[in-house]
Image: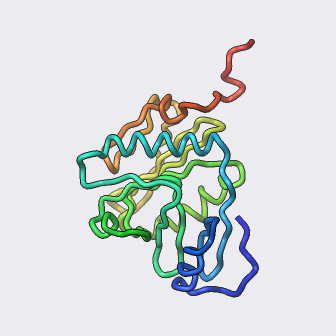
């Protein structure tokens, strides 16, 4: 992501400006960052995860949202997670700005992987309600969950060799075959022609 050349904005000014834009932009400490368009594999994985989580959460007080929804962190940051689940009553009543997700899922791409693993994860950890952060890599088929422990430390659960993505914070499981449905297997694992 690249910072747009403009003076620093307040959160209120950013929100007013962002709501008029045809493209999405994230906001951090007064700076605005244009979102890069996603590839087909990214879109497939996001849709698969959101659909399966949404179906499993039907009838519960939690809901899954994806891509175009704004998540505010403190007074200085607004991000667009790929998928998130909230069980918060205020979030479930909002039209535009969410603040208390239980689970955030980011689908990695070569251009965003380092950011999603480091700076973005650090921003998400500022959300008191967040219990789980899951990273999904469509290219390598790696799935990693970071879960907040009772001591407020984050513990890694690498599910890459498992058959399921487990979103323990919301009691959901999605078969990895369903997570990656519609995208080609990595070249090294495809059978010879």
Relative side of 185 to 175, left or right? right
- Of 80 and 104, nearer the camera is 80
Identify which residue is drawn at 49% across, 67% down: 70
Q: Position of residue 80 (x, y in %)?
A: 54, 62
Count of numbered circles on the image:
0
- The image quadrant of residue 43 is top right
Against 139, is 192 above or below? above
Q: Position of residue 110 (x, y in %)?
A: 71, 49
- Of 85 and 132, nearer the camera is 85
- The image quadrant of residue 190 is top right
In this figure, which colouring scheme has been used for the structure? rainbow
Quadrant (top left/top right/bottom left/bottom right) for the C terminus? top right
Residue farthest along the top direction in this orientation: 193
Quadrant (top left/top right/bottom left/bottom right) for the N terminus? bottom right
Identify which residue is drawn at 72% across, 26% down: 187
Relative side of 110 to 145, left or right? right
Q: Position of residue 83 (x, y in %)?
A: 48, 52
Relative side of 40 to 129, left or right? right
Identify which residue is drawn at 59% across, 56% down: 117
- Of 187 and 47, nearer the camera is 47
Q: Position of residue 40 (x, y in %)?
A: 65, 42
Against 188, is 18 above or below? below
């Amino acid at each position: 992501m690249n910072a747009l050349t403009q003076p620093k904005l307040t959160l209120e000014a950013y929100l007013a400006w962002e709501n008029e834009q045809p493209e999405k932009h994230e906001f951090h400490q007064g700076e605005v960052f244009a979102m890069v368009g996603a590839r087909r594999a990214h879109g497939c994985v996001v849709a698969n995860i959101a659909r399966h989580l949404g179906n499993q959460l039907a009838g519960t007080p939690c809901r899954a949202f994806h891509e175009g929804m704004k998540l505010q962190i403190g007074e200085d940051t607004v991000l667009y997670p790929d998928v998130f689940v909230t069980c918060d009553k205020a979030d479930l009543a909002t039209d535009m700005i969410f603040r208390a997700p239980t689970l955030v899922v980011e689908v990695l791409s070569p251009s965003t992987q380092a950011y999603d693993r480091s700076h973005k994860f650090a921003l998400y950890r500022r959300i008191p309600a967040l219990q789980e952060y899951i990273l999904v890599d469509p290219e390598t088929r790696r799935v990693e969950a970071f879960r907040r422990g009772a001591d407020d430390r984050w513990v890694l659960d690498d599910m890459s060799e498992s058959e399921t993505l487990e979103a323990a914070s919301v009691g959901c499981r999605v078969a990895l075959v369903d997570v990656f449905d519609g995208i080609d297997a990595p070249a090294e694992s495809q059978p010879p022609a």
